[in-house]
């Protein structure tokens, strides 16, 4: 069982930066593949980024590649998403997700067993 709690969301102007955190409970964080997903207003949940248990490899959605960076600190049981050059289109509820059975990175939300409650990110123009 893994419990996930996101934080770090908020309101930021276009071009600004935010860093999201996802604190995980349990002793299995270091063996879980982790992911960030988001749900924009009126849209379905979509993949943002994913990271392997060892921190490499990583994978990103085309829309965020070069602007967002996913990372993790297994000693702190924490996942991060550094978001730079934010755009109004990045406005969404951001969720972290985990799964201990994945042996490859996955952009499919159905591959992940555990989910956080989400944190709102709003980017103003």
Image (tube, rainbow, N blue to C red):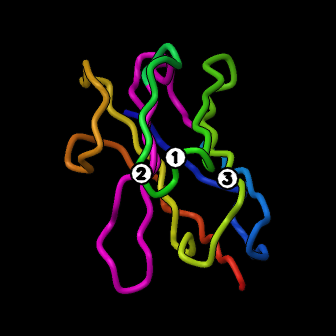
Q: How many labels sit on residues? A: 3
The residues colored magenta run: 23-51
Q: Quadrant of residue 121?
A: bottom right
How far across and how far down the image is residue 124, in percent? 71, 83
Residue at label 1?
65
Question: Which of pointers 3 and 2 indicates the residue nearer the eye?
Answer: 2
Determine whether 15 is above or below 78 in the image: below
For the residues labelled 3 and 2, the Cα–Cα distance comes to 14 Å
**Quarter assignment of residue 101:** top left
User: Nearest the camera: 1 or 109?
Assistant: 109
Identify which residue, 110 or 70, lies in the foreground.
70
- In the image, is residue 109 above or below residue 59? below
Q: Residue drawn 63% across and 71% down?
A: 87
Image coordinates for residue 95, horizontal then vertical, percent: 47, 56
User: Residue at (61%, 78%) from the top-left corner?
Assistant: 88
Quarter holding the C terminus is bottom right
Marks 3 and 1, how far apart at CA: 10 Å
Q: Is residue 39 left or right of residue 82?
A: left
Question: On residue 83, which mark appears?
Answer: 3
| Residue designated by label 2 | 62
- Residue 3 got which mark? none
Nearer-N-terminus badge (3/2): 2
Check whether the beta carbons of the residues at disc 2 and disc 1 lie within 8 A of each other: yes
Q: Give the residue drawn at x 41%, y 49%.
A: 61
Mark 2 to mark 1 CA distance (whole Å):
5 Å
């Amino acid at each position: 069982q893994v419990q996930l709690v996101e934080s770090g969301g908020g309101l930021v102007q276009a071009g600004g930066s935010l860093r999201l955190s996802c604190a995980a409970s349990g002793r299995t964080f270091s063996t879980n593949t982790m992911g960030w997903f988001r749900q924009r207003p009126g849209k379905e949940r979509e993949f943002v980024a994913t990271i392997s248990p060892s921190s490499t490899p990583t994978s990103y959605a085309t829309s965020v590649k070069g602007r967002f960076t996913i990372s993790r600190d297994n000693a702190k049981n924490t996942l991060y998403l550094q978001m730079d050059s934010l755009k109004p289109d990045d406005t969404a509820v951001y969720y972290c997700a985990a799964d201990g059975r994945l042996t490859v990175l996955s952009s499919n939300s159905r591959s992940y067993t555990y989910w956080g409650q989400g944190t709102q990110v709003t980017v103003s123009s």
